[in-house]
Image (cartoon, helix red, strand yellow):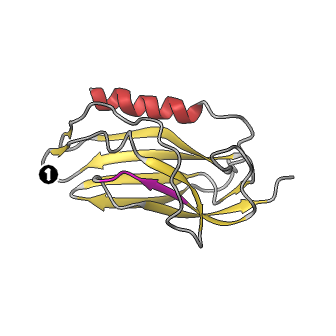
Amino acid sequence: MRIIWVVLGLVLFTACGGGGATDAASEPPTTTTVFFDGLSLELTFRAGEVESGTELHSTLRIENRSGHDIMVPDCNVAGARYALVPVDEPDAELWLQPVIDCGGPFVYEDGYGEEFDGPTFPAATKFGEPLPPGEYFAVLEAVGIAPRVEYPITIEPAD
C-alpha cells in the first residue's frame, strides 16, 4: 500500500509543473521497456519531440510477471531520477528526483501491474532555462530495479 502512496506522490509532483505542454495528441504513442528480475518498467510518450521550454509527458507502467513476489529494499521506483539529457552527454545529471526517502522495503506481488501518469520531463535545465534545440534522451533511472530507461527525443525551437 505504501508504494501506491509513494508513486502517487511522484505523479502529483510531476503533474504540478508549469503549463505549455506540446505533446502532439494526434501522434501514436511510443514506448520503451526495460526488464530486471521479472519486473518491467515501461515508459510511453505521446510524442517523439517537444518544444524547447515546455514539457514532455509520459506514462509509467510497472509490472511483475515473474511468477513470484519481488521485494525491493528501498523506494527505487518512487525515488527514480530522470531528465532530458543531450545525446552526446548520456551520463549528464538526472536532476529530477521528487521522492528521496519513502520508507521501503516494498513487495511487488506476482501479477502486480499498475500505470501512472508521469513522469513529466521539462525541456529545460534545472535552473528553468529552455534547453537548446537538438537530439536528447529522455532518461529514467531506478537504481536497483532496472537498467536505465532511455528514449530518443528531439527538442524543437520554441515558436
Q: Quadrant of residue 7?
A: top left
Specify whether 50 is left or right of 59: right
Q: Is residue 32 left or right of residue 145?
A: right
Q: Residue 20, percent across and down?
A: 75, 40
Judge whether 125 appears above or below 102 on screen. below
Q: Is residue 156 above or below residue 54?
A: below
Q: Is disc 1 surrounded by few (<14), some (14 to 19) or many (20+) residues within 10 Å?
A: few
Does 18 sit above or below residue 62? above
Q: Position of residue 14 (x, y in %)?
A: 55, 36
Q: Magenta segment range? A: 138-143
Picture mark count: 1
Name the spot of residue 30 as percent of width and height, x first.
Answer: 54, 59
Q: Amino acid at mark 1?
A: Gly
User: Which residue is tagged 1?
Assistant: 67
Q: Quadrant of residue 47?
A: bottom right
Of residues 11 and 104, the one drawn nearer to the viewer in this rendering: 104
